[in-house]
């Protein structure tokens, strides 16, 4: 049973050794042709397969064979088709080598879709060395593999194979790839050569114009030593992290400048009114954020085009995300979740050797830049005020002399002042509803029958609930300040603990001894005291000097009359002993606490808002 396992390991190790031993040398590269991809995922150059080469393929059922080498960090794309410049509906073979960050290889039956076979190939490409591969179509089976390998990386049996007449190469956006094609089979040297030819695509008027303007021109060359750039910023989204004091802002950056080297006469190019360039084809102003959390240039999101008009007027409308520091707290307390902030973002030129003078855009320029296409991302933050102004370099260095690190760099700065606040609707529901309900029940408990253990258990349960909530509330509140809503919760918690303590004390014998004192007896029997706290009136009974004087046959309750002003008082007693001194004292304390708690909470809630 062990021999099959040993045999399998021997085959795997042998195949791996054979693959790793093959090296694409410089001598082999001299017999190949070169194609460099610098325009991202775009098949812009096609090559035709020579007719004689196609005849030589027809041996042993091989209808197409191609040996290539790739040098790229990832995403080497190979396109095989029957027609030049196919569209998405034309059948093609597209092979993606090192896709997904150099992790897989895939064969597609249509352009950019319809995958038929794939394989995990981590590290199949290299950015520093050439890797050799071959493609073979034999007996309806198309294979792609490394040079010198015994087993293909991917293969696909096609019942309706293509008659391959053209091929092209592409990379990925931001990836520069070098392809060597028309390479001979390994070991045959220059004896076997291919004769593929580049297919010239018929250019439109605008494409011909761009080709003429970009000929012998460096894409990184500025229009001049001093460039005047008009700029405007739209805020498309905003989010503030109070824990880290970091502001994340989505912006739409609109820049205008004049490049006379890109101007043309429309009548000479069939009245072409505008042309568009991809980023990297021509110069554009690069910026960075002075108070950002990194030192990188301001990177755009997407692949927006640069539009140029006949007079050399260039427009670039791009979107970017800025992460900047913003700490605006002046006190240790804030009104979270009703907090508001004011932050600044400073945008400055990126290149130190370029002197850029900034200015604000006019209304007509903004209309030309398609400003209405900017959509605002809605979240919990709302921008209330935006202020933009230009700070000249002279004034900037005067305010911040330490930032003058290069005497040749005198670029202006664009300053954005943002006033924004949090939308507290959801927070109000989550935090204030439990607080109001809890306070309401606490105030209602003061009107319940005093000296009951049920009230003590209620206070204990409310205390536990608040403590549990405070344990989790720190994950949502800023930690470098104290939100006043937290003060509200702590105050309510302290009030509940105080009410529970007083309730327990009044249930002990201490309160009884206190109520028996002369001072408390006089206070509890005082008319004004009982009227203020709405206590039931005390009935008094007269002491007659003669027998049967004032005798009446009425019930016992008619003997006692309400007469607080008489001087001949013998004893005081409550009606049927319903109210004793201890209960009346507890009732007075409850009413006092109700008033104090209500006023205190109302004042604190008003100050919070």
Image (cartoon, rainbow, N blue to C red):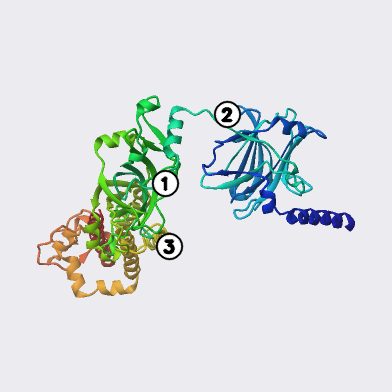
Q: Which of marks 2 and 3 is nearer the N terminus?
A: 2
Q: Is mark 3 on a helix, strand or loop?
A: helix
Q: Residue at x 47, y 27 (%)?
A: 204
How far separated are the C-alphas under marks 1 and 3? Answer: 41 Å
The image quadrant of residue 333 is bottom left
Q: Residue at x 66, y 49 (%)?
A: 29
- Depth check: give the residue in front, 130 or 464: 130
Few, some or many residues within 10 Å of mark 1 (<14, 14–19, 20+): some
Where is residue 190? Give x, y as percent.
Answer: 73, 45
Asked whether, in this view, residue 65 is left or right of residue 553, the answer is right
Residue 103, horizontal then vertical, whole percent: 63, 49
Return the x and y of residue 232 as percentages of the image width and height: 29, 44
CA gap, disc 2 and disc 3:
60 Å
Q: Residues within 10 Å of mark 2 (few under 14, many from 20)?
A: few
What is the quadrant of the N terminus in the image? Answer: bottom right
- Which of 435 and 482 lies nearest the eye of the viewer? 482
Find the residue positioned furthest to the front. 191
Element class at badge 2: loop
Task: Work out whether mark 2 precedes mark 1 in sequence or the reverse, and give the earlier one.
Answer: 2
Q: In this view, does 380 lie above or below 209?
A: below
**Residue pointed to by mark 3:** 471
Q: Mark 3 or mark 1, which is nearer the start of the sequence?
A: 1
What is the quadrant of residue 209 in the picture? top left
């Amino acid at each position: 049973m062990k021999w099959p396992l040993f045999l399998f390991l021997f085959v795997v190790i042998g195949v791996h050794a054979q693959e790793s031993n093959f090296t694409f040398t410089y001598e082999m590269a001299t017999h190949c042709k070169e194609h460099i991809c610098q325009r991202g995922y775009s098949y812009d150059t096609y090559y035709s397969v020579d007719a004689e080469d196609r005849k030589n393929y027809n041996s042993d059922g091989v209808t197409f064979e191609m040996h290539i080498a790739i040098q790229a960090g990832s995403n080497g794309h190979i396109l095989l088709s029957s027609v030049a410049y196919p569209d998405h509906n034309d059948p093609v073979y597209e092979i993606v080598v090192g896709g997904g960050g150099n992790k897989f290889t895939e064969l597609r039956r249509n352009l950019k879709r319809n995958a038929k076979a794939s394989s995990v190939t981590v590290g199949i490409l290299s950015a520093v060395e050439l890797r050799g591969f071959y493609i073979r179509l034999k007996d309806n089976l198309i294979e792609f593999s490394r040079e010198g390998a015994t087993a293909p990386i991917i293969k696909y049996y096609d019942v309706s194979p293509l008659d391959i007449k053209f091929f092209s190469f592409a990379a990925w956006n931001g990836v520069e790839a070098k392809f060597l094609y028309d390479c001979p089979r390994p070991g045959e040297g220059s004896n076997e050569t291919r004769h593929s030819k580049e297919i010239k695509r018929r250019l439109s008027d605008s494409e011909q114009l761009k080709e003429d303007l970009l000929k012998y021109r460096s894409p990184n060359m500025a229009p001049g030593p001093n460039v005047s750039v008009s700029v405007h910023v739209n805020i498309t989204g905003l989010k503030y992290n109070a824990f880290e004091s970091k502001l994340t802002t989505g912006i739409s950056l609109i820049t205008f400048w004049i490049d006379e080297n890109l101007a043309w006469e429309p009548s000479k190019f069939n009245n072409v009114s505008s042309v568009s360039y991809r980023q990297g084809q021509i110069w554009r102003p690069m910026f960075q954020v002075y108070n950002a959390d990194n030192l990188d240039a301001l990177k755009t999101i997407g692949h927006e085009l640069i539009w140029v008009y006949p007079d050399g007027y260039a427009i670039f409308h791009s979107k970017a995300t800025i992460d900047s520091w913003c700490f605006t707290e002046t006190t240790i307390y804030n009104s979270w979740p009703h907090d508001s902030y004011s932050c600044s973002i400073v945008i400055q030129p990126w290149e130190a050797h370029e002197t850029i003078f900034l200015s604000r855009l006019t209304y007509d320029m903004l209309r030309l830049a398609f400003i209405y296409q900017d959509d605002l991302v809605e979240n919990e933050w709302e921008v209330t005020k935006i202020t933009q102004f230009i700070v000249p370099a002279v004034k900037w260095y005067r305010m911040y002399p330490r930032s003058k690190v290069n005497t040749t760099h005198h670029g202006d700065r664009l300053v954005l002042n943002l006033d924004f606040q949090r939308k507290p609707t959801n927070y109000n529901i989550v935090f204030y509803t439990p607080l109001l309900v809890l306070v309401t029940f606490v105030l209602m408990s003061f009107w319940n029958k005093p000296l009951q253990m049920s009230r003590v258990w209620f206070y204990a349960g409310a205390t536990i609930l608040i403590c549990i909530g405070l344990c989790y509330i720190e994950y949502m509140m800023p930690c470098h300040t104290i939100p006043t809503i937290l003060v509200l919760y702590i105050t309510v918690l302290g009030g509940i603990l105080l009410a529970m303590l007083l309730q327990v004390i009044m249930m002990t014998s201490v309160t009884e001894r206190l109520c028996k004192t002369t001072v408390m007896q006089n206070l509890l029997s005082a008319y004004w005291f009982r009227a203020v706290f709405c206590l039931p009136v005390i009935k008094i009974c007269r002491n007659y000097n003669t027998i049967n004087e004032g005798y009446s046959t009425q019930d016992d309750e008619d003997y006692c009359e309400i007469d607080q002003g008489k001087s001949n008082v013998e004893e005081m007693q409550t009606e049927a002993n319903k109210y004793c001194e201890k209960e009346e004292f507890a009732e007075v304390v409850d009413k006092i606490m109700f008033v104090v708690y209500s006023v205190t909470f109302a004042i604190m809630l008003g100050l919070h808002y």
